[in-house]
Image (spheres, rainbow, N blue to C red):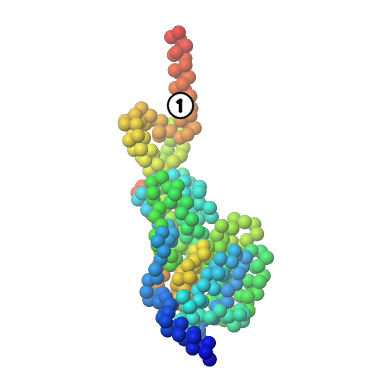
Amino acid sequence: MSNILKLLKVGIKRGRVTLKYPAEKTPTPEGLRGRPVLDFDVCIGCGACAKTCPPNALTVEEKENVWTLRLFYGRCIMCGLCEEVCPVDAYRFSEEFELASATREDLEVELQLLRVKCKSCGKYFTTKRVLDNTVAEYSELTGGYAEEFKEMIYLCPDCRRMDWSETLADAYREARYES
Amino acid sequence: MSPEADLAAKAEKIRKLGRSPWVFPVNSGGCNGCDIEIVDTITPYFDAERFGVKVASSAKHADILLVTGPVTRQSLGALMNAYEATPEPKLVIAIGNCACGGGICHDSFTVMGGVDAVIQPDAYVPGCPPRPEALIYGLLLALGKVEQKVKRMKFKEEGIDETRAPV
């Protein structure tokens, strides 16, 4: 009996502790990583996030002229690596944690971007947004120096290597004939 | 029948039972993190008993199965036994990333890759592990008490032909 009275005393002193959860919002700790939200307008389609994602929640599919990024929240462990590696900060971790859904499809996000052709061999090799971003960043860094290499940027890696080696060979030949 | 209508029908059945939904957690080879969150959820701080939710000691007494883990081949039989032992009408809720889509073990040869490979769950609760609030939310969603917040999102850059499927 005395034990119950003791408990009662503690209970009255402490008051109500239960959260009124669905009726009221619960306090969330600062820096809580909830659902990663992908900004479709900012994403350039480099695929770095899909390469680093530990549980393969992010997958990339490349088919002809379409580059598809799929994000499945049912597998995302909210580690924050995609936010860390993203070169353009397209990911933002919101504080939403109420991700429960009745169907699997509702947990999926799909982003489709256009791919571009190589100017020399005509193979699709990267997304249009990556090229635009590269040109913008490069000319900002070097102050217009990119103009000379602009043609090279629109080549696929294989053709770029060939182009560069041909340029080197020409330069070597010229130097040899001059001497 | 669409999944939403199916879910609502099942929740209606449970409501007509006129009793509290009792849950039975089944660990199908998970890391125990989600099970600890289930225990958290029934503490006085979160108090799932406000909604009549009580953890049953046997699947025979339960209305809702809380399945955690990626369903390993070893635990598949135990999971099916628990599923068959649960009396109708029953709900199955996939708790955590492993149960939702295989999680970090999704490409292993020892797992079935999520609960939906064997049983169609009525609600998915992602999270690694999900917060106790997320668990309560998922449970109420399965019972049809709250609205779903996430939706499928799709974005297509201009110039992609909608009619032609990418080869």
**Could you tell whether B83 is left or right of B130 in the image?**
right
Q: Is residue A65 above or below residue A150?
A: below
The residue sitting at the bottom extreme is A1
Residue B99 x, y percent position in the rendering: 55, 65
Residue at 38% x, 76% y is: A23
Spot occupied by residue B67 in the image (x, y as percentages of width and height): 57, 70
The percent coordinates of residue A44 (x first, y second) are: 39, 46
Residue at (42%, 47%) from the top-left corner? A86
Describe the element under mark 1 as helix, strand or loop. Answer: helix
- Residue B40 visible: yes
Quarter location, residue B4: bottom left
Task: Please state the horizontal and vertical placement of residue B166, each as a whole percent of the image.
Answer: 46, 49
- Specify the amino acid type for callout 1: Asp
Question: A8 above or below B29?
Answer: below
User: In this picture, is A111 found above or below A154?
Assistant: below
* Furthest residue toward top: A179
Mark 1 surroundings within 10 Å by alpha-carbon count, few (fewer than 14), some (14 through 19), many (20 or more): some
Report the residue at 57% width, 76% height from top.
B24
Residue receiving disc 1: A163
Q: Count the marks: how many?
A: 1
- Residue in the foreground of this view, choosing between A13 and A44: A13
Q: Which residue occupies 68% across, 65% down?
A: B74
Chain of residue at mark 1:
A
